[in-house]
Image: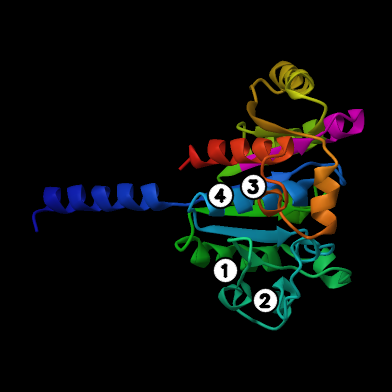
Amino acid sequence: MPYRAYVTVSRVKEKEMEHKRPVIASVSSGKGGVGKTFVTVNIGAYLAHRGKKVLIVDCDLGLANIDVMIGVKPSLTLKEAIFEDKIIDDIAIHTRHGFDFVPASSGAIEMAQLMYEDIEKIKEGLTRLAQHYDTIILDTGAGISESVLQFNLFANKNIILLNRELTSLTDAYATIKVIYQAFGRNSFNIIVNSTKNEEEAKRIFNHIDSICKRFLGFPLQYLGHIVYDDVVPRSIMKRETLLTHQDQSTPAINCASIAENIVSWQ
């Protein structure tokens, strides 16, 4: 094959691979208790409902709880991938909610103290799995630990979750600032959770957006909001997603809207 033809074919293949690359979205907040796991699970369920192949990874390595929220009892977790050389392919399980799930462990001190090499091992396993999915969602832990930073770097889309609390806003900004300073990332997608209405959500977004523009020099992207409703804690208690529990509720419609925005990334 002539050199020019070879180069052309190679570039076409590169373009095809680039096109097929899945969305890998990290979900972080800085502050704990703002609803990362709830949002991750429900967005994943709606994406799966749209026909997307979805993998959710519990990246809160020492305090994992997605398994509890969706009502599964995994026999293998990321702990076994790190310390017993199990492959992540064998750890991933299919759930009744339509998405696949890689569980982590809870209360394991060794998982809370992973070395950089251990996190790299997880990322390598996820890279192998990526070809099988349209979307991979990484539910990271609270704070800005090494694992949180590394999973945000691994992602090609960074989602930051916050709510109406002032501490949530300040911690979300701190998370954005650290990721920007560490890796040069300057594109962040904001979800405002547990808000009264869209007007309040936009006001909260505009506040953190103006702070980032002023002190970091770049704007944020508004991905959506989720209005608080009693249907949310009820669905969690029943270990159901909003899609199966009450799909016509306002929070369910909000989650569906966010999922549609994520579909547009592909």
Of the residues tagged 4 and 1, which is closer to the observer?
4
Q: Is residue 93 above or below residue 85?
A: above
From this viewpoint, is residue 1 visible? yes
Q: Is residue 179 above or below residue 6?
A: above
Residue on which the image places disc 4: 47
Q: SS class of the residue under badge 1? A: helix
> CA–CA distance between discs 3 and 4?
6 Å
Q: Residues within 10 Å of mark 1 (few under 14, many from 20)?
A: some
Residue on which the image places disc 2: 81
Q: SS class of the residue under badge 4? A: helix
Callout 1 amino acid? Gly
Which residue lies most toward the left here? 2
> CA–CA distance between discs 1 and 3?
23 Å
User: Which comes before the other along the chain, label 4 or label 1?
Assistant: 4
Whether residues under marks 2 and 1 lie with C-beta atoms below 8 angstroms apart, the answer is: yes
Q: Is residue 261 magenta?
A: no
Callout 3 amino acid? Ile
User: Which comes before the other along the chain, label 1 or label 3?
Assistant: 3
Which stretch is magenta? 158-171
Q: Which of the 4 image quadrants contains residue 103?
A: bottom right
Q: SS class of the residue under badge 3? A: helix
User: Which comes before the other along the chain, label 2 or label 3?
Assistant: 3
Residue on which the image places disc 1: 125
Q: SS class of the residue under badge 2? A: helix
Callout 2 amino acid? Ala
**56 relative position to 1: left or right:** right
Mark drawn on residue 43: 3
> CA–CA distance between discs 2 and 1?
9 Å
Q: Which of the 4 image quadrants contains residue 262?
A: top right
Q: What is the number of callouts on the image?
A: 4
